[in-house]
Image: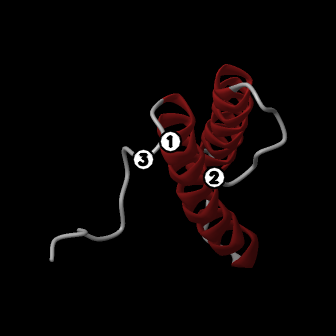
């Protein structure tokens, strides 16, 4: 399991949950900055890319919360013979 700092799955889930919240709040703050801009410059384009990447990181952290709460609930492939 990724990020096995804590032996307790609840603490691992809480850690990934806080990280997901941090990424989401940061993306929301950047989106607020982007929404109030008057023109499109290089800074706004970089901000948009950063928002996209932060949302991807938040999504990953949420998947890790699910995996910490219910190990094995997300599988990459089937084990059928």
Secondary structure at numbered mark 3: loop
Q: Nearer the viewer, residue 9 or 14?
A: 9
- Measure how far apart labels 1 and 3 are at the Cα level: 7 Å
Residue at 63%, 52% (x, y): give it: 1
Q: Nearer the viewer, residue 19 or 39?
A: 19
Q: Is residue 59 above or below residue 18?
A: below
Seen as rendered, the residue at the extreme front is 81
The reply to whether discs 2 and 1 touch (Cβ–Cβ < 8 Å) is: yes
Seen as rendered, the residue at the extreme right is 5
Tag of residue 10: none
- Measure how far apart labels 2 and 3 are at the Cα level: 9 Å
* Residue 48 spot, x, y in % from top left: 59, 65
Tag of residue 67: 1
Q: Which residue corresponds to mark 3? A: 72
- Measure how far apart labels 2 and 1 are at the Cα level: 8 Å
Q: Is residue 78 left or right of residue 42?
A: left
Tell which circle, 2 or 1, labels the residue nearer the N-terminal end: 2
């Amino acid at each position: 399991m990724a990020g096995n700092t804590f032996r307790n799955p609840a603490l691992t889930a809480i850690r990934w949950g806080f990280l997901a919240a941090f990424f989401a709040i940061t993306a929301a703050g950047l989106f607020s900055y982007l929404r109030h801009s008057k023109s499109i410059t290089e800074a706004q384009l970089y901000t948009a890319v950063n928002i996209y990447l932060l949302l991807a990181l938040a999504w990953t952290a949420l998947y890790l919360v699910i995996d910490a709460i219910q190990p094995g609930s997300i599988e990459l492939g089937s084990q059928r013979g």
